[in-house]
Structure formats: structure tokens, C-alpha cells
């Protein structure tokens, strides 16, 4: 007899299609999980950056309202130090520099937010895998 007969252990086309669709479904689920984990890290870095922006604004407001007057009068030293208007300008410049520093650090943190690059790269490999290419 011919050796081209189908044996019971040979997979059918239906079974192959079923297995392939199951594997594709599993692959897509794993890719989604990877993307979620990468986005979680990026969102945390973005949250820290936004928090630093908020802290910079809050500190600037408190400093201008509460500490500026006290420090300016300290620099003035009851008229024995610098003139009062120069004392207030010095205090203003100091707090402006402090707020600028916090904004700079916040910008650096926000720039750490990235797309889920590994998940995107692996997702691009799926069509190749489906075509039988490694």
C-alpha cells in the first residue's frame, strides 16, 4: 500500500487551525499584559513629574505670601541693612530660582515617560511568525 495514508496521529487541518488560533489568542493576551506593565512604569514617572510641578507651584505661592515679607524685613534689619525695596527684590529672585529648579527636575521626570517599546517590537514580529518566518 501507499505510505501517503492519513494516520490517526497526524493532525487535521481543523485541529491545526484551532491550535493556531488558540496560540495567537494567548500571544495577544501576553502582549497586552506586557504593554500594561510597561505603561504602568511610565505613568508612575509621569505622575512624579506632575507632582513636582504641583509642589513647585505650591512652594512658590507659600513662599511669596508668607516668607517673603519676613526675609525681606530681616535683610532690611530695621533700616540698618539694605533698603527695603532691594530686600524684597532679593527674596523674590531667590524664590523664583527655587521654583525654576523644581520645574527643571519635573521636566526631566516627565521625559522618562516612554511608549511600551518591547511590546510594540514584539507585536511587529507577529505577522512574520504567522507567515512562518522566524
Image (spheres, rainbow, N blue to C red):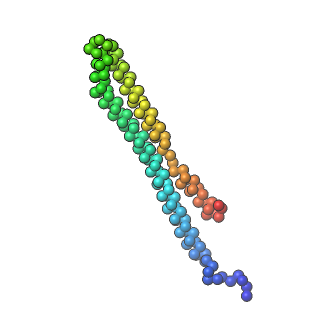
x and y percentages locating residue 54 in the rendered image: 36, 37
Q: Quadrant of the C terminus?
A: bottom right
Figure quadrant of the N terminus: bottom right
Residue 121 position (above or below residue 1): above
Seen as rendered, the residue at the extreme left is: 78
Q: Is residue 77 depicted above or below 6 in this figure?
A: above
Place of residue 72 in the rendered image (x, y in percent of width and height, measured from the top left)? 31, 20
- What residue sits 61% from the left and 75% below the top? 13
Q: Outermost residue, right direction?
A: 1
Residue 133 or residue 37, whichever sits in front: 37
Q: Position of residue 99 (x, y in %)?
A: 39, 30
Name which quarter of the figure residue 102 lies in: top left
Is 101 on the left-hand or right-hand side of 1?
A: left
Please give the name of the residue rendered at 43% of the width and 46% of the height, measured from the top-left corner. Answer: 44
Give me the residue at 46% from left, 49% from top: 41
Residue 70, by quadrant, is top left
* Residue in the foreground of this view, choosing between 16 and 84: 84
Give the x, y percent position of residue 88: 33, 19
Residue extending furthest toward the bottom = 1
**Figure check: 4 above or below 24:** below
Q: Residue at x 33, y 13 (%)?
A: 82
Q: Is residue 130 left or right of residue 112?
A: right
Q: Is residue 72 left or right of residue 103?
A: left
So how many labels did they put on this image? Answer: 0
Is residue 126 found left or right of 103 in the rendered image? right
Amino acid at each position: 500500500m501507499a505510505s501517503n495514508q492519513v494516520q490517526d496521529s497526524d493532525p487535521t487541518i481543523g485541529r491545526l487551525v484551532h491550535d493556531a488560533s488558540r496560540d495567537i489568542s494567548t500571544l495577544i493576551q501576553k502582549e497586552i499584559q506586557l504593554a500594561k506593565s510597561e505603561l504602568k512604569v511610565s505613568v508612575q514617572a509621569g505622575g512624579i513629574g506632575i507632582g513636582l510641578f504641583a509642589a513647585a507651584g505650591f512652594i512658590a505661592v507659600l513662599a511669596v505670601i508668607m516668607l517673603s515679607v519676613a526675609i525681606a524685613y530681616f535683610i532690611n534689619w530695621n533700616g540698618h541693612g539694605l533698603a527695603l525695596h532691594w530686600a524684597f527684590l532679593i527674596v523674590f529672585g531667590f524664590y523664583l530660582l527655587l521654583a525654576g529648579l523644581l520645574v527643571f527636575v519635573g521636566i526631566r521626570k516627565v521625559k522618562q515617560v516612554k511608549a511600551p517599546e518591547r511590546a510594540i517590537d514584539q507585536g511587529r514580529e507577529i505577522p512574520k511568525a504567522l507567515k512562518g518566518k522566524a
